[in-house]
Image: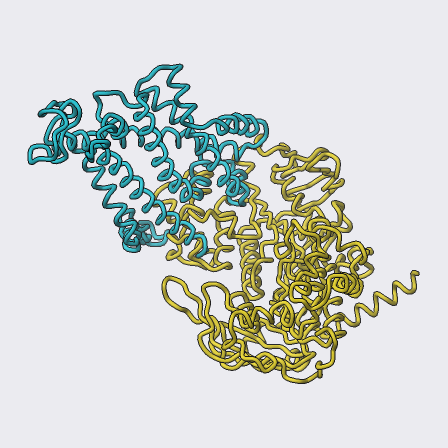
Amino acid sequence: MVSDKKRVKGEVLLEMRGVRIEGRSDEVWNPIIKGVDLTLRRGEVLGLIGESGAGKSTLGLAAMGFARPGCRISAGSIVFDGKDLIAASEDERRALWGSRIAYVAQSAAASFNPAHQILEQTIETAVSHDIMPREKAEADARDLYKRLQLPNPDTIGDRFPHQVSGGQLQRAMTAMAMSCRPDLIIFDEPTTALDVTTQVEVLAAMRAIVEQFNTAAIYITHDLAVVAQMADRIMVLRYGNLVEEAPTREMLKQPTQAYTKSLWAVRKLLKPESISDDIVLRIHDVTASYTGSIKVLDNVTVQVPRGRTVAVVGESGSGKSTLARAITGLLPPSQGEIYFNGKPLPKALAQRDRDTLRRIQMIYQSADTALNPRHQVRDIIGRPLEFYAGLRGAARDRRVVELLESIELNESYIDRYPSEMSGGQKQRISIARALAANPEVIICDEVTSALDQIVQEEILSLLMRLQRDTNVSYLFITHDIATVRAISDEIVVMHQGKVVQQGPKSKVLSPPYPAYTELLLSSVPDMDPDWLTNLLAKRSRKAGVTA
Amino acid sequence: MSTTTAPLRNIKARRTLAENVVRTLRTAPISAWFGMIVILFYAICAIFAPLLAPYGESEIGGAAYQFSSWQHWLGTDQIGRDTLSRLIYGARNTIGIALITTVISFLVGVSLGVLTALERGWLDQGISRIVDAFLAIPVLIFALMMLAIVGKGLVNLVIILALLDSTRVFRLARAVALNSVVMDYVESAKLRGEGMGWIVFREIIPNILPPLITEFGLRFCFVFLTIAALSFLGVGIQPPTADWGSMVAESKSMIGFGRAAPLYPAAAIALLTVAVNFVVDWFLHRASGLRDGQ
């Protein structure tokens, strides 16, 4: 099966007709996929895009003839290389999985067994399916590591999953999927959890290897710019229906459906930059660390003007969330001062009085963990009102309703639990909880990164409207450059605990850039399908020049 | 109302407790219903024992070792007390004492468990190591030893068993609370300036309640079995107080004569254990099902 004898490019490999998938909840079967056709040819990469809940992962798994527990494929046909996967027995399907159809999941960290070495796991399928002998499989895995541009390809396989970075693990997982030279690989959001600079490397590696082996692939993502780099053809899904299907360039140039157009419209939101000298929060020369030896924040100085938005950008590990912890007092800085309205803030949380706490509020990335699942909206928003303003009973409820209206929800939400709301609604409740305290500064820690594009935009415009209404300042922590471009007044770029650059948006986002800012900005994918090719060419030219 | 404020509206009231209970009960499976009916039956026996029992708790109502008859449905014991009456009173004593013991052990175990999960550090280390030491010793042997040291007696029995049991509750409460204390909503409450009481009782405990309730059911069974075992060994509930463990002990030799006397209290113990487990199973299922849904 390793030989490429039968791999004729263009031959139909997978054909799905009228596929319907249902999921069981509350004792009834609800449709998830409502009759979708999908054709995939050898050597072709098909992009599946849509918002969360559109059914893209379900459809991707169905391409393997697999339905998640609690789901069933209720109608339609799935024919893979002449074999009907629905009619096939469990054993027949299992023989295909891993060897001829492979799956690359979003979180490589969760998909690797932490107790086994990477090489061992990479070759496991090839060896257990008797596709190649062990020695050959090991040599082949090392070769794949090299092709995927993993560092030290000969020895990296001896490491355990926790000893390599997230991007490397994601590439190792691609090697695992490739180990049997499958005919079809399903990539399910493989780069969503990665930083932009790592994402570029992983995308390039995956694209190269798919091309080299003439493998067909289904690439599932919600990131349009990424899919533009990877896919030959794009299918847009919504509510389990196919909205539109076209070759990538065609679809990027002229989407026909309104929904696709709304996805395609480059973020409309753009706040004009405005600068102010009225500093509400000043972080001065702050150094902080968790263990005492490694400085997570290294002489950081940041100023937040009143009524403005300061965006803190950087990759994971750059110290941007630690900055939030230092400001809130959860991690008292070992050095430096934080001034609030000109007065130094007590370093530790316990030393701050209630009114100081009220003035600095925080909104978290994931409303699922930030809202107590056992509290109703009435209690979630009502508690700060009770705690800081002493409101009780009907007066408190009335204020809760006012706040709900200010975040564009209504009083019918008052007795809901977080699990009874959508992601965007939950994030709105988090915002209302912060507003209830009537704060001067709100720290927003990646507040939109768990949300779909359209919802993101709604949340951002809500935050901007609230800023106009209440003159609150935002310290907006994010890794998403597009968000920064849309809403910030000033930008702070952080890298390895240090501030690389800070200044007004117009200055930071226009050349000349410091080296790191340039790397960060150039790694953000464009909607242009040639973006990745051009970027790689440009970078290799540059490397050639410096070498 | 002044004209500046919006007209007052009736803000939706939350679902009442009774409505919630009814909604929940509708979904209960047959095994859980069986369990609940049995538990209810036991509870009625325990509460209304003086009204239900044909004879007094230690009243001698006839000759010893009588067979079943219309006067004594289940016969009489070695000194002529009515077995049925002693079974009914036994429900009151055995279940009541087991319940009190379990409640105390949960109060101690859960509050310490959540507190150590929140605080970590030396407090956690200290308490956890002491608990580890306790867990290394078999409960029955440790209880026997302690009862030998401090003396037999109801209060001593309850305190010793509650403390021993609280070590196991502590372990569970700490483990489940550890998952909850790292959540952003706990951090958010800390940043708000909330006190320890609010964080423990309003933020954390509601989230770890399902496994704790389940554990309560199981712990209750274990405590109840331990008390029965201790009574059987003669250091538990003391005569003439009726209790199922000592009833088995007192009548155990009768089984050799083909008499069913020791089987009645044993069956009472077994039935209650099974019933509680059925209900607990249902709870466990519901609790884990809820998590799937989220």
Quadrant (top left/top right/bottom left/bottom right) for the C terminus of chain A? bottom right
Quadrant (top left/top right/bottom left/bottom right) for the N terminus of chain A? bottom right
Viewer-side residue, A268 vs B2: A268
Total marks placed:
0
Image spot of residue A537 (x, y percent): 83, 70
Chain A drawn colour: yellow
- Identify which residue is drawn at 59% across, 77% down: A235
Q: What colouring method underlies this structural image?
A: by chain
Q: Is residue A323 above or below residue A521?
A: above
Of all residues, the one furthest to the front in this rendering is B257
Viewer-side residue, A235 vs A156: A156
As drawn, is A536 to the left or to the right of A50? right
The chain whose colour is cyan is B
Q: Is residue B195 visible?
A: no
Q: Is residue B170 above or below residue A247?
A: above
- Identify which residue is drawn at 23% across, 45% down: B37
Q: In the rendered image, which quarter is residue A187 located in?
A: bottom right
Q: In the rendered image, which quarter is residue B258 located in?
A: top left
Image spot of residue B77 (x, y percent): 17, 27
Image spot of residue B171 (x, y percent): 48, 34
As drawn, is A68 to the left or to the right of B267? right
Q: In the rendered image, which quarter is residue A520 located in?
A: bottom right
Viewer-side residue, A204 vs A260: A204
Q: Is residue B252 visible?
A: yes
Viewer-side residue, A452 vs B282: B282
- Identify which residue is drawn at 56% across, 69% down: A61
